[in-house]
Amino acid sequence: MKILAFAGSNSRQSINKKFVTSVSKYYKEADDEVVILDLNDFEMPIFSVDREAETGIPEQAYAFAKQIDWADLILMSLSENNGSYSAAYKNLMDWTSRIKGRKLFADKPILLLGTSDGARGAKSVLEAAEKRMPRDGADLLAVYSLPSFYENFEEGKGVIDPSLRASLEATVRKTKRTMSERLNTTKEQQ
């Protein structure tokens, strides 16, 4: 299985990148390939229809779309800035959505994650994404919020709170089962 993982943040110290990288390890099996993207590799001017008319869609948007198209499964952990998407993530989505004939997420299955240093664990941005992403071609398999990142996560160990870890692992098992069933059905149909 080809797994694409990224955080909806351009912070070099992103807790969401640490979180999604840790979660991606649950999916790495013998024949699986995991690619972890950094949104800094897709930095573009702020989207505007005027800029699009003048210069077209930046190459980075096409490169990001190519990564989505490559993946069998997407793991995404959204950061929350003032209760919403980070500007870097939103800008990347705005540009990529402008590619002619494209559903932004190309009907790919997605495990949507989020964390923050607060007790709500990025729930505001996750709620917004959960409503919006299916309209953008996302097949949301599950949504998982990790509250109070610095209290509940340790690098090298992942989620350290036993009940939060059990909940995450149950979510991972569910998505892995779903993906296995889908991939087996696809193989049978070929």
Image (cartoon, rainbow, N blue to C red):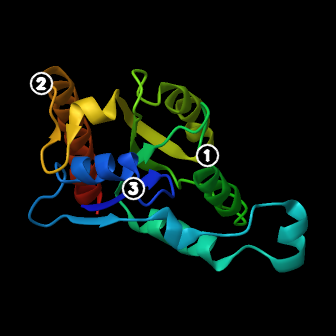
Spatial separation of the CA atoms under disc 3 and disc 1: 28 Å
Foreground tag (3 vs 2): 3
Q: Which residue is mark 1?
A: 136
Q: Residues within 10 Å of mark 3 (few under 14, many from 20)?
A: few
Q: Is residue 183 above or below residue 36?
A: above
Q: Which residue is mark 3?
A: 13
Q: Residues within 10 Å of mark 2 (few under 14, many from 20)?
A: few
Q: Give whichever of 93, 9 is nearer the camera.
A: 9
Name which residue lies at 62% across and 59% down: 92
Q: Secondary structure at mark 3?
A: loop
Q: Is residue 75 visible?
A: no
Q: Label 1 near label 3: C-beta < 8 Å?
A: no
Quadrant in which the C terminus appears: bottom left
Q: Is residue 178 above or below residue 147?
A: below
Q: Residues within 10 Å of mark 1 (few under 14, many from 20)?
A: some
Residue 30 at what x, y percent from top left?
Answer: 8, 64
Q: Give whichever of 16, 134 is nearer the camera.
A: 16
